[in-house]
Image: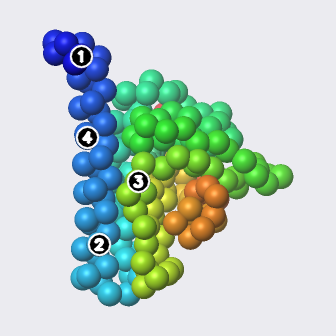
Amino acid sequence: MAPVGPRSGEAIFASVERVNAELFTLTYGAIVRQLLTDLEEVEEVNKQLDQMGYNIGIRLIDEFLAKSNVSRCVDFKETAEVIAKVGFKMFLGVTASVTNWDAEGTCCNIVLEDNPLVDFVELPDTCQGLYYCNILSGVIRGALEMVSMKTEVTWVRDMLRGDDVFELQVKLLKQVPEEYPYKDD
Ligand code: MYR
């Protein structure tokens, strides 16, 4: 039998992190299930998840900017890379890749091959039309709005609907110029 001894701090931290991630995943699942019970219409659940994500996103951006030390992005291309590589890593523990840019550099897709939100999830047939991870599109929309970017964020591929990856389209609708706070007199 292997000797029983104190575990290293790193091992304990890793297992606490794993338990936290599982708790988070299960809690999110319970929220979706409750919304399905309360709202009945899948379309309404999609809207509610997006709105919840938006409300989180407008607050989470402060934590993101404070913790990440990311400075102002030069353009939307850099912003998309920051979301995929730094944002997803910080809040979901996974990285994503950015693909499919349009010619103007205002629309791209973010591809997630790994998505901890859907661990243990299997959707019944009655949930056709549900965008289970719609909270994520809302988070991105809310966070970007706080740094002056109005966006539309939609799912184009979803593993719970039989696709091989999760893929979000992020379209920049309007970049609101930030006002200089002082008047030049
Ligand atoms: C800037 O130019 O001001 C920097 C903008 C960076 C925006 C990054 C938004 C991070 C959103 C995190 C999404 C996490 C999804 C789980």
Comes first in the chain, label 2 or label 3 = 2
Answer with the quarter of the image where residue 44 lies.
Answer: bottom left
Q: Give the mark count.
A: 4
Classify mark 1: residues with Cα within 10 Å, few (<14), some (14-19) or many (20+).
few
Nearest to the eye among marks 3 and 1: give it: 1
Type of the residue with mark 2: Arg
Q: SS of the residue at dot 2?
A: helix
- The earlier-in-sequence mark between 3 and 1 is 1
Q: Which amino acid type is shown beneath numbered disc 1?
A: Ala
Residue 124 screen position, x and y as percent:
42, 78
Residue lying at 42% horizontally and 85% vertically, measured from the top left: 126
Q: Earlier in the sequence, mark 1 or mark 4?
A: 1
Q: Which residue in the rendered view is the most extreme toward the front?
A: 1
Q: Position of residue 172 (x, y in %)?
A: 63, 56
Q: Which residue is mark 3?
A: 119
Distance of label 4 from label 3 (alpha carbons): 13 Å
Rendered-image quadrant of the N terminus: top left
* Lateral position of residue 128 relative to residue 100, left or right: left
Mark 1–mark 4 Cα distance, whole angstroms, equals: 27 Å
Distance CA(mark 3)–CA(mark 1) = 31 Å
Identify the residue at horizontal 30%, vertical 59% (top origin): 28
Of the residues shown, which amino acid type is indicated by label 3? Asp
Disc 2 target residue:
33
